[in-house]
Image (cartoon, helix red, strand yellow):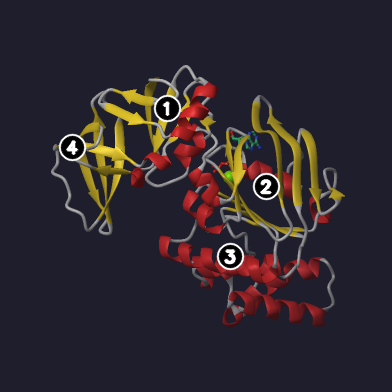
Amino acid sequence: MSRVALEHITKRFDDVVAVDDLTLEAHDEELLVLLGPSGCGKSTALRIIAGLEAPSEGTVRIGDRDVTDAEAKDRDVAMVFQSYALYPHMTVARNVEFPLRARRVPPAERDERVAEAARALDITELLGRKPAQLSGGQRQRVALARAIVRRPQAFLMDEPLSNLDAKLRVQTRAELVDLQRRFQATVVYVTHDQVEAMTMGHRIAILDRGVLQQVDAPQAVYERPANLFVARFIGTPPMNTIEGRLTGGADHLVFEASGVTVALPAGLASATMSASPDRVVLGVRPEDLRLDPAGSLTAKIILIESLGHERHLVVRLDDGQTVIVRQPGDQTPPRDGEAVTLSANPDSLHLFDADTEQRISS
Ligand SMILES: Nc1ncnc2c1ncn2[C@@H]1O[C@H](COP(=O)(O)OP(=O)(O)OP(=O)(O)O)[C@@H](O)[C@H]1O
Ligand SMILES: [Mg+2]
């Protein structure tokens, strides 16, 4: 398969800038996820790669070819949508075969490739049925079979699992990852679901209002979010962000908010001294906070959500800011309304400049 690259792509719809100077590449055999909230420009970026939308500025490359001005049908990419867009009057076999007929592939080869795609997606027994006689998950597999039968340069997928129920989504997610590996496919995969992005992507590109925020491996994005937007977008429950101020000097820099005192570890302290931000936001993931009688954050429990294997303790700090603490299910839960103290794992603190919203990196 081939790499897919966007170079300085901007797309304007009248006064809306849907994609803003986006430069991004899915490497050969990579599953790259485009992630972001509704309206951030994910589908527009994908449609520009597919040739269904022309960019206002910038270059699209597939392999070594500049395809910016090529028609969609000449780009040799297969698109899979949220709505499976199967032809209702055709059987599954005819649906899967359709792109091959359109390309005038000879009948014998057509049959062979349809059988191969059907085996890959485990739909051989369904080949004689019509789409109306299939479940949502089966329809989605037929749509995928129709995409792979073409052996395109790359796959473009726009929220392909979002019509499936939760259980089927998890299963189909794993099947898609397996398929990508077996076919060594280059895939650009759009979703607004960060769990899907984390579990499927080799790398994740996070967009906000058309602008690329960060692109990196899932764990790297989780551990080192580039800015407050990414910090708050990745993770369930999301990262706690606490506004406050810095006191002390280089050898003992302390983050303070009402009822909160957190000493910064040496590396982060020196990075912060050289960045010298006016105002800061401290980021702490819910799993990096714990109930601790000797802790330096004073708070009050306002809600306890039990998920069985863990609890989410919603607590209010003295100045009214709310944070969430993840507590393993086998620990003793606090009482509703109880006054507690918390401590934060010093090695997993994140600090952001409150004005630029950028990460201050140690
Ligand atoms: N054809 C169009 N005409 C005008 N505006 C458009 C058009 N297509 C998209 N937009 C606007 O461009 C922005 C990005 O839309 P896009 O569909 O790419 O978002 P998305 O990230 O895919 O969102 P979702 O998760 O809801 O599918 C939105 O503000 C949208 O309203
Ligand atoms: Mg979309």
Q: Amino acid at mark 2?
A: Leu
- Residue 134, compared with residue 307, is above or below; it is below
For mark 4, give the secondary structure: strand
Instruction: Locate residue 13 relative to residue 335 in the image: left or right.
Output: right
Q: Amino acid at mark 4?
A: Val
The reply to whether callout 2 and callout 4 are in contact (CB within 8 Å) is no
- The kind of secondary structure element at disc 1 is strand
The residue beneath circle 2 is 46
In the picture provided, is 108 more to the left or to the right than 347? Answer: right
The residue type indicated by label 1 comes to Val
Q: CA distance from mark 2 to mark 4?
A: 48 Å
Q: Position of residue 192 (x, y in %)?
A: 52, 46
Between marks 2 and 4 in the image, the one whose residue lies nearer the viewer:
4
Figure quadrant of the N terminus? bottom right
Measuring 78% from the left and 58% from the top, which residue is drawn there?
A: 2
Please tell me how crowded label 2 is: few (under 14), some (14-19), or many (20+) other residues with Cα within 10 Å.
many
Q: What label sits on residue 281 in the rendered view? A: 1
Label 2 sits on a secondary structure element that is helix
Lateral position of residue 181 relative to residue 1, left or right: left
Residue 88 seen anywhere in this rendered image of the structure: no
